[in-house]
Amino acid sequence: MQIEIDRPTIPSTFTDPEKHAAAISAPRTVVVFGMPRGGTTMVAGICQRCGIHMGSDLPRNLEDQDFVGKSHDHMINAIKQRDQQFNVWGWKFPRAAAYLSDLQNALRNPMFILVWRDALSVATRGAKNTGDLNKSLSVAHSIQTQNLKFVSQTSAPILHVSYEKAVRHPVKLAEDVQAFTGVTDELDHDDITAFATPGTYK
């Protein structure tokens, strides 16, 4: 396991370099997930700017509608179509861990990006709708537990992203995403910084 010393400028960490090296040597699929209102849109936008196809005609939250509320068969067909079109592609859906175990065998060299955000920040935003902070905290904790269970059981490479650090250092995150996924498109630092500014993305 590769764990870097924590510093404010390190927004992400990936583990198991051998798995990572094998994955980026072949066509691959990148999935971004985490928690609703947890920063996955920002990270998905960074993936786009790194050169990863994250879907076409996306809504503002960058969620590919072929992987939101669709049947297992629908998603499998979408995966097959994207595999034919792209060498490296992916999608973003915060609650993807709920179905990734069922899809994993259909994914070509899957690579997962798990976005972590302070649970209280997420729950406070959720409580604006529910009026119950404790309930929102419980939901956030449940989702984080599900995410951790999935990444603990998968054999695929994982990039763990701290939203709080990534939003302060988006260019470094983009560099980390490229190192993790093996894509090499030239980065536009100004575009990345502008996009990652809170309030710019949904």
Image: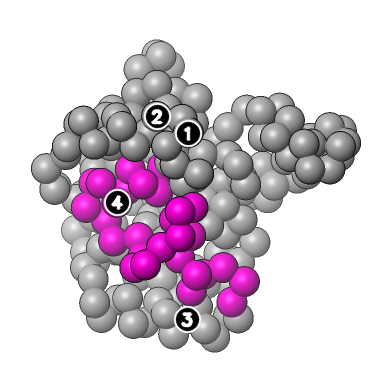
- Judging by the rendered image, the residue that carries numbered circle 3 is 76
The residue mark sitting in front, 4 or 2, is: 2
Check if mark 3's residue and mark 2's residue have beta carbons within 8 Å.
no
Q: Describe residue 127's horizontal placement relative to residue 153 as left or right.
A: right
Q: Residue lying furthest top in this view?
A: 7
Q: Residue at x 45, y 53 (%)?
A: 60
Type of amino acid under label 3: Ile
Frontmost residue, 36 versus 14: 36
Q: Earlier in the sequence, mark 3 or mark 4?
A: 4
| Whole-percent x, y for residue 130 in the image | 84, 43
- Judging by the rendered image, the residue that carries numbered circle 4 is 48
Q: In the picture shown, does residue 22 fall above or below 104? A: above
Frontmost residue, 61 versus 77: 61
| Whole-percent x, y for residue 8 in the image | 41, 14
Q: Quadrant of the N terminus?
A: top left
Check if mark 3's residue and mark 1's residue have beta carbons within 8 Å.
no
Q: In the picture shown, does residue 100 fall above or below 73? A: above
Q: Which mark is residue 199?
A: 1
The residue mark sitting in front, 3 or 2, is: 2
Q: Residue at x 50, y 44 (%)?
A: 202
Look at the numbered disc 2 and give the secondary structure of its residue.
Answer: loop
Type of amino acid under label 4: Gln
Q: Earlier in the sequence, mark 4 or mark 2?
A: 4
Query: CA gap, disc 1 to disc 2?
Result: 6 Å
Look at the numbered disc 3 and give the secondary structure of its residue.
Answer: helix
Type of amino acid under label 1: Gly
What span is colored magenta in the figure?
43-70
